[in-house]
Image (cartoon, helix red, strand yellow):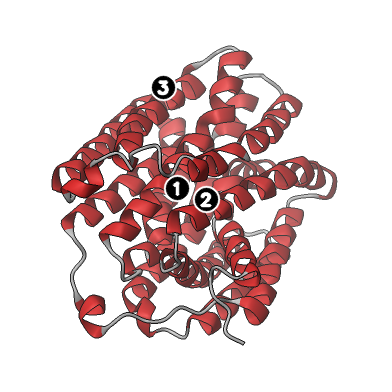
Amino acid sequence: MHITPEAGRGRATLMLCHFAGMVDLVALPVWVGTLAQHYGFDLEHAGMIVTAFLLGAVGASLVAAPLYNRLPRAACAFGGYAVAALAFLGASRVAGFGALAALHVVAGLATGTALSVAHGTIGRSANPHRLFAMAGTALGIGAVIFYGAVPPAVAAHGGPTLFLVFAGLMGAAALACAVGFPQVVTSGRAQVAAPLPRAAWCAILGVACMALNQALTFSMLDRIGVLRGFGQDKVNGLLVVCGLVNLLPAAIAGMLQKRLNPLRVALVAAPLQAALALVVTLSGDFLPYALAGAVYPAVLIFTHTFLFGLIARLDPSGRALASTPAMMMTGSAIGPALAGAVAMRAGFGGQAALAVLVGFGATLCFALVARRAHPSLKEAT
């Protein structure tokens, strides 16, 4: 039976694929915090283990994205998530740095391959902006469940619980792909071979910069709160609130598709993200830290929904959007290790300065998109 991205089963499969593949957007603070608290790693080494997963995902996406229209996409999605599930199951049974890092690389390579074909398929749907908004909403719902259930379970049963959760999530995505991964008609050879527009490259780089800022600050949200003396219970409560807030941005972005220009959204969001990072990293009081931390991920989720639709218009072949894991996780991969290294050497003030620098880079990239994009993309949509 031919399943399309617009069919109920195909849409549900892509939403689950998105949540499983982009689990780092949800889990970063819990991931780094678990490795530091339950495995005894310092912030730098905890960040390096998470970075190993993200680098693997980036590498796989960079290979898979240009080949999107030639790959057996359903098989890649099923196999990728299945291998990732096995790798995380293995990670739940080891405790050494080397073994954990190696298994994280394997999981990242597998996840990046699967997520690339999923995002490319979303990009080839009838309305990429709307379907990606639905996938983002699914990520928000998953985040609420994750923050409400996983940190208490990790506290009660130990660090391996986190990796068992990851294994279960990847396994569920693999099963969904086996029975319901949608099919799209491949484009002609000329479209596949055509180079990506420069505006698309600028948009990709801008998304990567925003993802880097996201990872720099969000990966340390747990540790910043604990080390500032706010208490683990308050920080865990903040994560639950963060999940609830993240239910909204993708859904709102979907509703505002025809009302907001994606370029203007990006040019406002990049500096706003940097400003919120300053509050999270520099605040000595819990309330400003919590308010900024609660809405911090929402900025990227909201903005990326608009940029996903924009890139789909800049490159209809689906190849650019198949590289979404690379553009998101390149920043995310660098972020945890870099944040840990900067925090240990220059404190959280050093992190704040770095967030401003990266935010400026993202804003510059989006300004170049506005300069290079076709005039029709600059008009209000």
Q: Secondary structure at mark 2?
A: helix
Q: Say which label, 1 or 3, has the lower sequence index.
A: 1
Residue 233, compared with residue 117, is above or below; it is: above
Disc number for residue 305: 1
| Residue 26 in sight | yes
Q: Amino acid at mark 2?
A: Ala
Q: Which residue corresponds to the image point at 66% horizontal and 19% vertical from the top-left?
A: 229
* Mark 1 burial class by Cα count in 10 Å: few <14, some 14-19, many 20+: many
Amino acid at circle 1: Thr
Mark 2 or mark 3: which comes first in sequence? 2
Q: Residue furthest left?
A: 371
Question: In the picture shown, does residue 112 fall above or below 335?
Answer: below
**Relative image position of residue 183 (x, y in whole percent):** 51, 79
Q: Disc 2, disc 3: CB below 8 Å?
A: no
Label 3 sits on a secondary structure element that is helix
Q: Quadrant of the N terminus?
A: bottom right
Residue type beneath disc 3 = Gly
Q: Would you say 248 lies left or right of 116 here?
A: right
Marks 1 and 3 close (CB-CB < 8 Å): no
Using the numbered discs, state the Cα–Cα distance from disc 1 to disc 3 in whole angstroms: 30 Å
Identify the image quadrant of residue 188. bottom left
Does residue 92 appear in this view?
no
Task: Give the quarter of the image for residue 231.
Answer: top right
The residue singled out by tag 3 in the image is: 349
Of badges 2 and 3, nearer the viewer stands 2
Q: Nearer the viewer, residue 124 or 288?
A: 124
Q: Quadrant of residue 294?
A: top right
Which mark identifies residue 133?
2
Q: Are marks 2 and 1 in contact (CB under 8 Å)?
A: yes
**C-alpha gap between disc 2 and disc 1:** 6 Å
Query: Residue placed at 39% from the left, 26% from the top?
Result: 272
